Image (cartoon, rainbow, N blue to C red):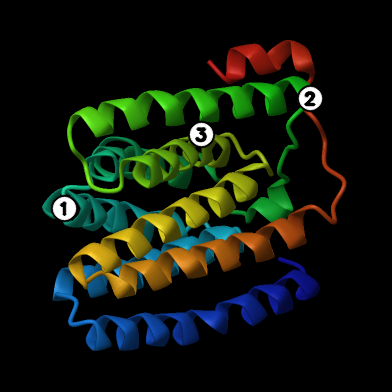
Amino acid sequence: MSRNHAKKLLTYLLLLPIEIAAVLVAGILSYDDVLKICVSAAGIAFNLLVCVQNRIGFVIGAAYAIGYAVMSYMETVYASAVFMAFVQFPSAILSFVTWKKKSAAENGLIKLSATGVLLTVMASALFTGIITVILTLLNSSGALFDAFFFSMSIVACYLLAKRYRAAYITIFLSGIGGTALWIYQFAVTGQGLSVLIVNAFVTINAALGIFRQYRKTLPTIPDTNEGDKMK
């Protein structure tokens, strides 16, 4: 790791105790249960470490996924529960394995080609539409917000595992969807403020990741391979 990269990593990690403290205060003020607060703290650590390209974040992410799945099921937020248990959890394990011991900054990320961008947008829109209909039929809480969060998160998992720089954009959008979902949940139930704060921080951290990554010139996978990779 270069000295410059180490300094940047330290700067971003200084945000970690500040963000976790904010989550704890929010959870206590809104009388969130212990599960919500613990899941929220793990989510902050997972997101920030991934956004600064530290693979240890995926280990925390695996535990976070299981806790979030249980919490979401208890809140009748079914798409998030299914996503966390059956997509986020295995994806975190896979990403930890595929991301080598070196940081992504040293190994190199890849940018999507025009075909890859188009396929990503189409897949996200399709997932959101289909899942919204299913959740509405199941009377799931905050169906549209949950569907958008689910869709952007599943796309982010794929892009992270494949080491695409665009993952940070989808994490950002996932954060927006998660924030909207838990604003709704908080308005309805009066709980979940700590989870709301986590999703707000996810959005901010992803924005920092976007800023760091999109200042760089990265190699592109040829269009001829994108169709297969997005299937």
Looking at the rendered structure, the number of numbered marks drawn on it comes to 3
Residue beneath disc 3: 158
Q: Is residue 54 left or right of residue 219?
A: left
Tag 1 secondary structure: helix
Q: Quadrant of residue 196?
A: bottom left
Label 2: few (<14), some (14–19) or many (≥20) C-alpha neighbours in 10 Å: few
At x 33%, y 83%, the residue is: 26
Q: Position of residue 52 (x, y in %)?
A: 61, 63
| Earlier sequence position, callout 1 versus callout 3 | 1
Name the residue tied to disc 2.
114
Position in image of residue 190 (x %, y %): 21, 72
Separation of residues labelled 1 and 3 (CA atoms) = 22 Å
- Label 1 – label 2 distance at C-alpha: 38 Å
Q: Nearer the viewer, mark 1 or mark 3?
A: 1
* Residue toward you, 39 or 200: 200
Seen in the picture, residue 82 relative to 172 is either above or below; the reply is above
The answer to which of marks 3 and 2 sits earlier in the sequence is: 2
Please state the horizontal and vertical placement of residue 88, each as a whole percent of the image: 35, 43
Quick check: can you spot residue 216? Answer: yes
Q: Amino acid at mark 1?
A: Val
Give the amino acid type for the residue marked by disc 3 in the picture. Tyr
Marks 3, 2: nearer the viewer: 2
Task: Compute the Cα span from label 3 to label 2.
Answer: 17 Å
**Which residue is pictured at 32% across the width and 52% down the height?**
62
Under mark 2, the amino acid is Ala
Residue at the spot of label 1:
70
Indicate which disc, 1 or 2, sits on the residue closer to the N terminus. 1
Q: Quadrant of residue 29?
A: bottom left
Q: Left or right: 180 with respect to 133?
A: right
From the viewer's perspective, tell me whether residue 10 is left or right of residue 34.
right
